[in-house]
Amino acid sequence: MQALSLTALAFFLLSSTVVGIRLLCLARRTRQTPELAIGLAFLLGGVLGYVPIVLASAEGLVAPAAAPAMLVLGILSLDLGAACLWWFSWRVFRSAGHLGRVVFAAALATLAVSLVGEAASGGFDRATLSHSAWYWLGFGARTSAFAWCFVESFLYFGRMQRRVRVGLAREVDAHVFFLWSLTTAAVLSMFLLRAIAAGSQGTLPPLVVLAQAVLGLMAGALIWITFFPPRWYLRRYEST
Amino acid sequence: MAPSCSPAFEEAARHLEELSDLDRLQARGTLRIALKEAGLAAHEVSGAEMRVVVEKLLPVELDARGIAEADALCAGIGERLGEATPEAEAPSPASVFRRLRAR
């Protein structure tokens, strides 16, 4: 079970890294900010955030004195990744009106407060981190970034389906929003399972480990299909 | 504060108001309902999209409000909608995602 869980995590991180780099290359060509933001979100919220945290949390992989610095690096990276995701949802789905700006500002403020609070309370200790209210405040803000993405993309999928019906959009252009909502729902579920797991003392129940592994594999595959659609997928949806 | 409407919406609403008995508020409201049926909003609709909505969905909405000769009225609005209607300023999520997955 543990091997499956690690494989799933590795696949998820590999997928988000490759797609993130590809999107950053696209941003370099197009000079557009949405691809820059989502590319950074994948890298910072994936491999650059999780690897330092996993290294710092595992016994004996890094010197105990270096663990807090690794944790700071990892959490800062996750926060920056979440901020990029918040920015992406705001600018892509809610650029008109003030609501998106207000939500983005509130998310940034929450992430900043959680970091400062954790630092001020002498935190970033691997033994006590998951008991800290400041950590969970930041965790909530990071989780909400995926929740907002999920809601916006699912609502937009509904609107795109209406456009398809009157001939204003192609099925393939509508379906990408369904894929993106599934991707964010899978990651969101991983976050929620992480929160549930933190509440359980000792070893995780096998069902939770299995669910995390399945969600990791799903999210990894969905990221790939959403942003780097394979030819079979395009043939399937471009023909409808 | 509500986002400002696209130039295509403003132009179509003006023509609908001029060619029908609807007042400004009714014309804009009816147009917004037709746009919603097409999954669009007033702030983002382009000229090309507005022409499709006027042709396919607006006649139904006008019929439902008892406006006589809705088809002819919509054909008139379609003719008046300039080919060169400026596009909405902000790129739509659909256009952003098309770019993100371009090979």
Image: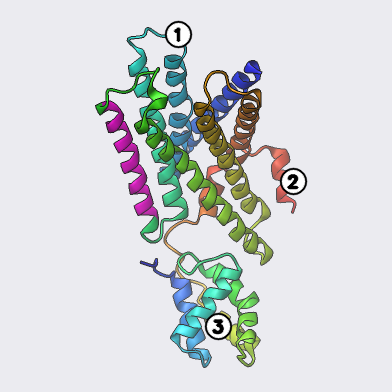
Read off the residue under disc 2: A236
For label 1, the crowd category at 10 Å Cα-Cα, with few meaning under 14, some 14 to 19 and many 20 or more, is few
For the residues labelled 1 and 3, the Cα–Cα distance comes to: 71 Å
Q: Would residue A127 be found to the left or right of residue A47 on screen?
A: left
Read off the residue under disc 1: A61
Count of labels shown? 3
Residue A109 pos. (x, y %) = 31, 43
Which residue type carries mark 2? Answer: Arg
In the displayed structure, A83 sits above or below B92; it is above
Front residue of A141/A101: it is: A141
Q: Would residue B24 be found to the left or right of residue B80 on screen?
A: left
Residue A47 pos. (x, y %) = 48, 24
Magenta segment: does it hold B100?
no
Magenta segment: does it hold A114?
yes
Which residue type carries mark 1? Answer: Leu
Residue A111 pos. (x, y %) = 34, 38
Q: What is the magenta range?
A: A100-119
Task: Specify the label residue B77 is tagged with.
Answer: 3
Which residue type carries mark 3? Answer: Ile
Front residue of A124/A23: it is: A124
Front of the two marks 1 and 2 = 1
The residue drawn where x is 60% and y is 68% is B38
Q: Chain of mark 3?
A: B
